[in-house]
Image (spheres, rainbow, N blue to C red):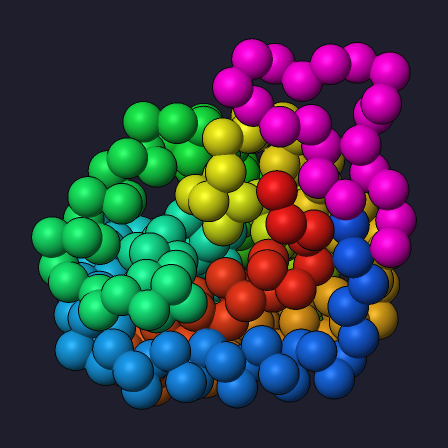
């Protein structure tokens, strides 16, 4: 176990010091995914309801981009979903905690727990990840204009331009590379910060620092976890977001179990 607390400074009144980070193995990643699936099966209606809300929301955003003739932002927006997914998963943390404590999850209980968490530093953490998404969208737009110009293209013309021209392929490679670097940074400070802020009275900076320490202390396991998230969200995108109905609840519940496995109890 890696001691992560700064013993030289007292904790703020009502808040705990920086939690200790525990070791996580690749086998643990498989186990937290199994636990996420188990929680989803224990409360499927709640999981499908929350997943359905965000699936419909994703469709609405994509339709808006197409309506305003911005098809080049559809893929960056879909890929950037991973930036805000940890905040979206807050409802699943509430379900998993209820199940963990032997309570039956209810709609009012979940909403109340999320609302209570939003009054604390979860809201500031959501602002950080939301700002990261906006930065990514701006970068994606600048790269598009830099490589493919300012001309307006239909969705079919855009796909043809990207996949059949040298500039389009270069844009695809560089754009995905930049997005991967930014996504890795966001993943590092949000991997365990949202469930920690949901569960504990702790400030968001401490939660971010602890999350980075978890990633650095468990590099291989966290690479596997990051790759698992990317792969499952990629499958959701290929399914037209329909896969989010199931994948989002499983990943949300699994994130809770990762936090419980990687951070020492309060």
| Residue 15 magenta | yes
| Residue 7 magenta | yes
107 or 11: nearer the viewer? 11
Q: How many marks?
A: 0
168 or 94: nearer the viewer? 94
* Percent position of residue 75, x then y: 43, 64
Compared to 2, does 129 lie above or below?
Answer: above
Q: Which residue occupies 85% across, 23% down?
A: 7
Q: Is residue 163 left or right of residue 233?
A: right
199 or 76: nearer the viewer? 199
* Percent position of residue 90, x then y: 36, 52
* Percent position of residue 226, x then y: 66, 68
Q: Which residue occupies 20% across, 59% down?
A: 57
Q: Is residue 39 left or right of residue 45?
A: right
Compared to 123, does 167 lie above or below?
Answer: below
Which span of residues is magenta-colored? 1-20
**Residue 114 image-quadrant placement:** top left
Compared to 52, does 108 lie above or below?
Answer: above
Magenta span: predominant SS is loop
Compared to 123, does 158 lie above or below?
Answer: below
Q: Is residue 261 visible?
A: yes
């Amino acid at each position: 176990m890696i001691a992560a607390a700064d013993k030289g400074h007292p904790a703020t009144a009502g808040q705990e010091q920086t939690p200790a980070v525990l070791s996580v193995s690749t086998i643990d990643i498989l186990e937290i995914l199994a636990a996420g699936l188990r929680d989803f099966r224990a409360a499927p209606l709640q999981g499908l309801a929350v997943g359905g809300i965000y699936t419909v929301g994703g469709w609405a955003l994509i339709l808006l981009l197409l309506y305003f003739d911005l098809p080049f932002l559809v893929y960056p927006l879909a890929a950037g979903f991973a930036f805000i997914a940890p905040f979206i998963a807050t409802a699943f943390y509430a379900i998993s905690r209820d199940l963990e404590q032997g309570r039956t999850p209810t709609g009012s209980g979940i909403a109340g727990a999320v609302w209570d968490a939003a009054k604390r530093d979860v809201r500031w953490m959501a602002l950080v990840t939301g700002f990261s998404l906006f930065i990514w969208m701006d970068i994606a737009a600048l790269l598009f204009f830099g490589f493919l110009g300012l001309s307006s293209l239909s969705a079919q013309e855009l796909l043809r331009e990207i996949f059949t021209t040298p500039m389009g392929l270069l844009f695809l490679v560089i754009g995905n590379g930049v997005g991967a670097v930014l996504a890795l940074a966001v993943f590092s400070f949000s991997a365990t910060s949202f469930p920690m802020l949901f569960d504990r009275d702790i400030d968001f900076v401490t939660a971010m620092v602890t999350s980075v320490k978890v990633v650095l202390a468990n590099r291989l396991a966290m690479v596997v976890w990051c790759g698992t998230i990317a792969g499952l969200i990629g499958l959701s995108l290929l399914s037209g977001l329909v896969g989010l109905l199931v994948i989002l609840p499983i990943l949300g519940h699994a994130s809770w179990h990762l936090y419980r496995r990687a951070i020492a109890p309060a």
